Image (cartoon, rainbow, N blue to C red):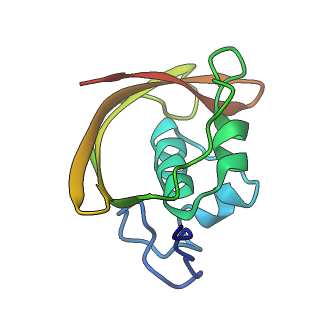
Amino acid sequence: MPGFPVVTGDASCPCGSGETYDGCCAPALRGTPPATAEALMRSRYTAFVVGDGAYLRGTWHPGTRPDDVDPDPALRWTGLSILGTREGMPGDTRGRVEFRARYRAGRERGELHEDSRFVWQSGRWWYLDGVIG
């Protein structure tokens, strides 16, 4: 079974922001809560890329989190496009991020289209759930 890719600090961040990994999602995955719902969404995408199930569990609201959130090592996430955001900025209590995430599973290619909901609670953003479109 293949392992997850390793992303180094000066590499391009997998979330597609154009920043380096150290300048973008790495601080979140190392414990610094993201300041916006979009930044949390991007860091969660990166966690799927690198196989960081602990981060995914830790950023999913306990009221909606399923028992199993571990990334599938057979899936390779290959790109993220943010289609839009609503609220989710510092000072907001709710946020939404619509995105498309591309993946590969063996020879198959696919795309996940989701409108994700986030909530600001206990001094940080949490992923609540999403509507898959």
Residue 59 lies, in percent from the top left, at 66, 37
**What's the residue at 73%, 53% (across, down)?**
32
Residue at horizontal 72%, vertical 21%?
Answer: 62
- Identify the residue at the far bottom of this view: 10
Q: Is residue 85 above or below residue 1?
A: above
Does residue 128 appear in the picture of this structure?
Answer: yes
Corner quadrant of residue 83: top left
- Identify the residue shown where x is 43% and y is 66%: 14
Q: What's the residue at 76%, 54% (across, down)?
A: 31
In the rendered view, tell whether residue 8 sits above or below residue 95.
below
Looking at the image, the residue that sits furthest to the front is 1
User: Residue 74 at what x, y percent from top left?
Assistant: 45, 58
Against 88, residue 77 (above or below) is: below
Q: Where residue 76 sits in the image (x, y, percent)?
A: 39, 61
13 relative to 128 in the view: left or right: left
Q: Nearer the viewer, residue 77 or 16?
A: 77
In which quadrant is the C terminus drawn?
top left
Residue furthest top in the image:
63
The residue nearer to you, when weighing 57 against 12, is 57
Rendering quarter of residue 6: bottom right
- Residue 81 lies left or right of residue 5; in this view the side is left
Taking 88 as reference, is 50 above or below it? below
Is residue 83 visible to the viewer in this orientation of the structure? no
- In the rendered image, residue 49, in percent from the top left (x then y), is placed at 49, 60
User: How many circles with numbers are drawn on the protein?
Assistant: 0
